[in-house]
Amino acid sequence: MQKHNQKTFTMNKSQIEQQVIDILKKKLFIDDITIESNLHSGLGADSLDFMESIMEFENHFKITIPETESIKFETVADICNYIETVIPA
């Protein structure tokens, strides 16, 4: 019996960071977003913007982000760090 090779979805930290920033730029219509940006005070994301962004991250990275985790996100770095822990590096 022959085994089928399965491709594994892998990304390094800088790829994750860039893709998260790109998603936020599109969702929030803001060009000046960095890894240190605060989601609420710095970017002014309201709860709807935030939830839509979370859903976009889930779709893009093929992951699930539980609400118990997403409510802890304060900065772009927090999102990236979480995503890095749930997908292979």
Image (cartoon, rainbow, N blue to C red):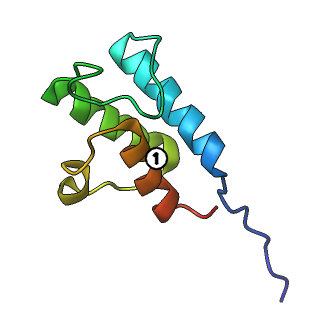
Which residue ends up furthest to the bottom in the rendered image?
1
In the image, residue 47 lies at what x, y percent? 14, 30
- Frontmost residue, 2 versus 40: 40
Mark 1 lies on residue: 80
Give the vertical position of 20 relative to 13 (above or below): above
- Frontmost residue, 76 versus 36: 36
* Left or right, residue 54 beside residue 88: left
* Left or right, residue 34 beside residue 75: right
In the image, residue 55 lies at what x, y percent? 32, 39
In the image, residue 5 lies at what x, y percent? 79, 70
Q: Amino acid at mark 1?
A: Cys
Q: How many marks?
A: 1
Who's the residue at 25% across and 57% down the image?
A: 69
Q: Is residue 58 visible?
A: no
Which residue ends up furthest to the left in the rendered image?
47
Q: Quadrant of residue 51?
A: top left
- Frontmost residue, 53 versus 21: 21
Who's the residue at 58% across and 33% down the image?
A: 18
Give the vertical position of 53 relative to 82 (above or below): above
Q: Is residue 82 visible?
A: yes
Secondary structure of the residue carrying numbered label 1: helix
Image quarter (top left, top right, bottom left or bottom right) of the N terminus: bottom right
Who's the residue at 32% across and 54% down the image?
A: 65
Q: Quadrant of residue 37?
A: top left
* Left or right, residue 15 beside residue 33: right
Who's the residue at 41% across and 56% down the image?
A: 82
Q: Quadrant of residue 33?
A: top left
In the image, residue 59 lies at what x, y percent? 43, 42
